[in-house]
Image (cartoon, helix red, strand yellow):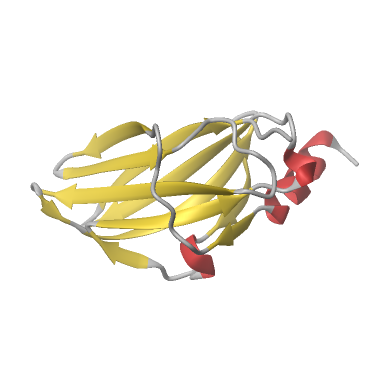
Amino acid sequence: MARTGRFAALAGALTLATGLPALAAAATTSQSSGPLKATFTASTHSPKINQKMPITVTATLNGKPAHATAVYQFLFGGAVVNTQYPYGNKHFSFTGHYRDNLVFPAESVGEPLTLRVVIKASGHTVNLSWSITSHK
């Protein structure tokens, strides 16, 4: 299988899970577009396979909780190889913040991926990128 095809299949195997443990020793990344500011918080850049990796996303518009949408894009080598949605909901929206858990399959071990969370609100878009390499 071609390398790009293999990673499309790998990213397609990623699952989203529910259950919201607290984030320990979390790190963040933030971006803004005009009045829209968004922050992504995750517990690690190297999640353990088949274990929940908790994440938190926040968004504000003019300093107030934003009514926004979110989409996950998984990139390999800068190319989007898969798109998924928080809680499997294609029309997912939130106000202010939400939490989710990502679970990485065994096929992802050692492969450098980038998770991009695309946040849209009131005509503005913010891309929050997080590098990920899962391990056993």
Direction right: furthest residue = 1
The mark tally for this picture is 0
Q: Residue 115 vs residue 57: left or right?
A: right
Q: Residue 103 vs residue 70: left or right?
A: right
Q: Residue 118 vs residue 101: left or right?
A: left
Residue 131: x and y, percent? 53, 30
- Establish if 70 lies above or below 39: below
Q: Residue 111 vs residue 33: left or right?
A: right
Camera-side residue of 115 and 8 = 115
Q: Residue at x 43, y 71 (%)?
A: 91
> What quarter of the picture does the C terminus occupy?
top right
- Establish if 54 lies above or below 93: above
- Establish if 115 lies above or below 25: below
Q: Residue at x 17, y 49 (%)?
A: 60
Camera-side residue of 30 and 121 = 30
Q: Residue at x 48, y 33 (%)?
A: 130
Where, by quadrant of the figure, is residue 39 drawn? Answer: top left
Residue 70: x and y, percent? 39, 57
Residue 22: x and y, percent? 39, 49
> What quarter of the picture does the N terminus occupy?
top right
Residue 110: x and y, percent? 73, 29
